Amino acid sequence: MSTFILEVATPEKLVVRNDASEAQIPGSAGMLGILPGHASLISEIEAGELTYILEGKKRTLAVAKGWVQVTANKVRVLVDSCEAPEEIDVKRAEESLKRANARLLSPKQDLDIARALNAAKRAQARLEVARGNS
Amino acid sequence: MPSLIDLRRRIRSVKNTQQITKAMKMVAAAKLRRAQERVLAARPYAEIYSHMLADVAGAAAAAGAEVSHPLLAVRAEKRILLVLVTSDRGLAGAFNSNLTKAAWAFAGEHQEAEILVEAIGRKGRDFFQRRSVKLTGEHLGVVDKARFADASAIARKVAGLYEAEEIDAVYLIYNEFKSVISQKLTLTKLLPVAMEASEEPKDYIYEQPPGQLLGTLLPKYVETGIYRAMLESAASEHAARMTAMDAATTNAADVIEGLTLHLNRVRQASITKEIIEIVSGAAALG
């Protein structure tokens, strides 16, 4: 089975470097399905669920926003944060989702809407990934 | 002449100091290893990022679009912000004084401009607090933990100041980690961003227009730049402390040796004196 190299890096460390046979990446213009031999591509990524298939098994990661670069048989993902389901602190994610929602519902003057939205999305993605696993 | 008791006391005191320096050296060595790992761990992201930025910049330039972004705007450098990364603690040899000296010299060379300092680390803050330089902010206790979130917050603030045209250029001063025995003082320009666009833009599908991608990529440049400086500085700090404490331990051993020699001489002299007294006393009686 043909595969490609998937690299997922955060500023702090390289999280994944694996041979994957398929990947679903939450691009900001819609989900990107990547198979081996995909055309070269650069896109932004939204906070969401990144899944890939490693040796026939599906793996899920919760990623924050970032970018993806697809080149000949290499998929490189740069994100602000990335967690496997077992690493996610559900309580913290729930709290931060609540906080972000509260901020969006009662906007103050100096509210950075993009940041609050992103925080909400990131928390949402973490929760979904964590629950999908259990 | 110091008495025997005084000498013994001094030897004991130097021995205690030696034990402390030896322990500090060992602690620094352990922390250095962890800091080095973090420097290495941060490399893949930085590498991928710089490739991506070059490709996107190349594509944006090739598309003929005027590449403009607030972080690329070049202005006359009337107000310069220095981001100074020092350590929070001393006892690391010339680690911090080299940095503050270089920062001070930099201010001297740019007298026509107003110099502002954003201090990361206590030592740099203390130095500039005592001088007539305006501090725009201070960040204590962040270098050792080296979390990206801290670097990112500092970067957002610096980029905000730059975009608001409160400052016209940003320079970064820190110690780069070369090896355990050498740390290189580094002064680089952080803003405006000096982009290297790749000459031959590769044939990518761009989900977003390259110009827009550039707009989201560029702020990351400042964040990763400051983050890297913090990581390098943390590794350098522990390396410098290790070397300094190693030298201090060796010095303490030398001092102890000298004092012990002296102590023995004094003791011998007093014994000799006593014998002479006894002998001459006996001679007088006989």
Image: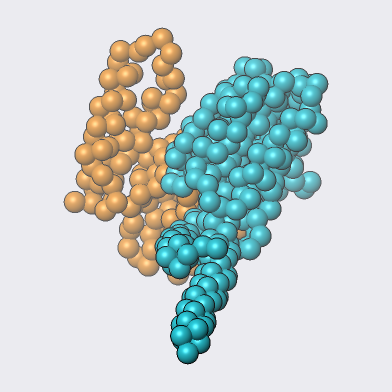
Chain colours: A orange, B cyan
Instruction: Examine the rendered structure and indicate whether residue B210 appears above or below residue A16.
Output: above
Tell me where residue B46 appears, x and y as whole percent. Answer: 59, 49
Q: Nearer the viewer, residue B116 or B91?
A: B91
Tell me where residue B202 appears, x and y as whole percent. Answer: 70, 48
Instruction: Examine the rendered structure and indicate whether residue B4 appears above or below residue B143.
Output: below
Tell me where residue B145 appears, x and y as whole percent. Answer: 43, 46
Tell me where residue B253 appears, x and y as whole percent. Answer: 53, 70
Measuring 43% from the left and 56% from the top, which residue is drawn there? Answer: A15
| Left or right placement of residue B228 versus residue B70 in this view | left
Q: Nearer the viewer, residue A122 or A20?
A: A122
| Picture quarter with the N terminus of chain A | bottom left
Is residue B34 at least partly visible in the picture? no
Q: Nearer the viewer, residue B275 or A132?
A: B275
Q: Nearer the viewer, residue B209 or A92?
A: A92
Measuring 68% from the left and 53% from the top, which residue is drawn there? Answer: B184
Would you identify the image quadrant in which residue A124 lies? top left
